[in-house]
């Protein structure tokens, strides 16, 4: 029996303005599984992703590798769940690329040699080794997206949670991203409009709309259901 990486039960979330973004969401993700979360704008995809390491919390239960989403468990959960945000400017805050990518390992208490090795490998994995000493805010949007992925990979997470990872990537680097995700053996949860990326990288799909799960199943089955996709404003 596969270990459960993520267990979500009866999760609901409302923003302060009263917008109910998630409504009674329940699903599990097995360790090593690759799950795509699809849906139109405003479906609740980003809100759901932000519950995986406790950035957002409301009603319901979120369990990561057996640990409940409680304050005492957050350091361990956040070491396990590597989160890549949709907007890289929300993730990059240090002067140089090396500083951003090394921030996590340093704060996890790794020694200098281990930190440097992790940074070099993470930047190599996303084709950004040339930018190690570049200023983060001078990078293009696509380059920033790749550095954000490196900031997470450097910590060797057990779960990779990605919010619109292919947006603003040129075709070559989108293909590189897909190839990397196919090789990456840890658990992956990918929220995206990019159905092609989901079809190539995910074994299972959850379709969200208006904060609810409206369909879930094998990626190939869901993504071939044109009537279902069109009904929920997806192509």
Image: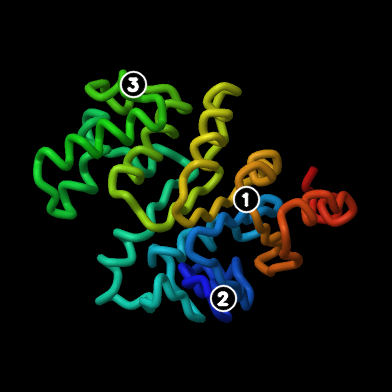
The vertical placement of 196 against 57, above or below, is: above
The answer to which quarter of the image holds residue 74 is bottom left
Secondary structure under tag 1 reads loop
Give x and y (percent) for residue 143. 42, 26
Query: Residue tagged by mark 1?
Result: 202
Q: Is residue 148 left or right of residue 59?
A: left
Query: Residue tagged by mark 2?
Result: 12
Q: CA distance from mark 1 to mark 3?
A: 33 Å
Q: Is residue 228 left or right of residue 147?
A: right
The vertical placement of 149 against 2, above or below, is: above
Label 1 neighbour load within 10 Å: few <14, some 14-19, many 20+: many
Front in this rendered view, residue 37 or 20:
37
Residue at left 31%, top 18%?
130
> Is mark 2 in CB contact (under 8 Å) with mark 1?
no
> Is mark 3 in CB contact (under 8 Å) with mark 2?
no
Front in this rendered view, residue 117 or 169:
117
Label 3 neighbour load within 10 Å: few <14, some 14-19, many 20+: few
Ranked by sequence position, the earlier of labels 1 and 3 is 3
Secondary structure under tag 2 reads strand
Ranked by sequence position, the earlier of labels 2 and 1 is 2
Give x and y (percent) for residue 59. 50, 80
Q: CA distance from mark 3 to mark 2?
A: 39 Å
Query: Residue tagged by mark 3?
Result: 138
Residue at left 39%, top 32%?
125
């Amino acid at each position: 029996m596969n270990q459960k990486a993520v267990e979500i039960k009866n999760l609901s979330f409302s923003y302060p303005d009263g917008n109910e973004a998630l409504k009674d969401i329940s699903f599990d993700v097995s360790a090593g599984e690759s799950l795509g979360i699809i849906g139109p704008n405003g479906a609740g995809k980003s809100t759901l992703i932000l519950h995986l390491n406790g950035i957002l919390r409301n009603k319901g239960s979120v369990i990561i590798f057996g640990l409940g989403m409680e304050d005492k468990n957050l350091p361990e959960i956040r070491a396990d769940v590597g989160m890549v945000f949709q907007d890289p400017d929300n993730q990059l805050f240090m002067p140089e690329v090396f500083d951003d990518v090394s921030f996590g390992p340093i704060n996890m208490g790794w020694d200098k040699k281990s930190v440097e090795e992790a940074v070099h490998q993470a930047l190599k994995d996303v084709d950004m080794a040339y930018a190690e000493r570049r200023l983060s805010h001078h990078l293009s949007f696509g380059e920033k997206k790749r550095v954000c992925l490196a900031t997470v990979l450097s910590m060797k997470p057990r779960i990779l949670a990605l919010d619109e990872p292919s947006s603003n990537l040129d075709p070559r680097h989108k293909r590189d991203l897909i190839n990397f995700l196919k090789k990456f053996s840890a658990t992956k949860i990918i929220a995206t409009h990019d159905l092609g990326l989901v079809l190539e990288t995910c074994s299972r799909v959850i379709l969200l709309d208006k904060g609810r799960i409206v369909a879930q199943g094998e990626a190939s089955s869901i993504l071939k259901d044109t009537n279902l996709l069109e009904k929920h404003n997806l192509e």
